Amino acid sequence: MEFSMPSNGYVFGSLLVGGLLSIYLPMNSLVSRYLGSAITANITFFFMALVTSVLLFGLWGEYATLSRLGSVPRYLYLTGFVSAFIVLATTFLIPKIGVRKFFILTISGQILTAMIVSHFGLLQTPQDPIALKKIIGALLVIGGAVISTL
């Protein structure tokens, strides 16, 4: 399989999202400290996310997509629970272990899980079998992240 780099816009967008993750998750953790509750901070986060999503939905006029809600397999609606758990866990964990360690562990978990998901083509993703060079690459990325915190 030939490796091809995505267009510059996608690369920039992905880097931007990564940077935003490194800012917004600690921000939500800080909201938790001000409020004295990780759960209340989570509610605040998702309320603002809902308001933003509804505004964008209205601006882009995607009303016709509502008729397809019934076609989504029910188990996929668990993404809401997963999102809530991720944000709540982040809000709790960052003050305990720090931003740097949190993201190194999070990225390591993402790399390892992504390799499994890709290997088996889970969740209708393109199947990309695990190979020795991919394992070595993942270990180098994770090792580099760990070394950067020493």
Image: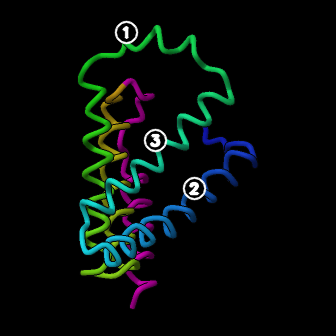
Q: CA distance from mark 1 to mark 3?
A: 22 Å
Q: Nearer the viewer, mark 1 or mark 2?
A: 1
Q: Indicate the amino acid at tag 2.
A: Val
Residue 119 occupies quadrant:
top left
Q: Residue furthest front?
A: 35
Q: Give yes or no for contact between labels 1 and 2 (Cβ–Cβ under 8 Å).
A: no
Q: Indicate the amino acid at tag 1.
A: Ser
Residue 35 occupies quadrant:
bottom left
Q: Main secondary structure of the magenta part?
A: helix
Question: Residue 83: percent from the left, percent from the top?
Answer: 33, 46
Identify the residue under disc 2.
Answer: 17
Q: Magenta residues?
A: 124-150
Q: Give yes or no for contact between labels 1 and 3 (Cβ–Cβ under 8 Å).
A: no
Q: Could you tell which of marks 1 and 2 lies nearer the N-terminus?
A: 2
Q: Secondary structure at mark 1?
A: helix
Q: Indicate the amino acid at tag 3.
A: Leu
Question: Residue 144: percent from the left, percent from the top?
Answer: 44, 76
Question: Residue 73: percent from the left, percent from the top?
Answer: 29, 16
Identify the residue under disc 1.
Answer: 71
Colouring chosen for the image of the structure: rainbow
Q: Could you tell which of marks 3 and 2 lies nearer the N-terminus?
A: 2
Membership of 132 in magenta stretch = yes
Identify the residue under disc 3.
Answer: 50
Q: Which residue is at 39% across, 49% downward?
A: 46
In the rendered view, tell whether residue 112 sits above or below residue 10.
Answer: below
The label shown at residue 129 is: none
In the rendered view, tell whether residue 100 sits above or below residue 17.
Answer: below
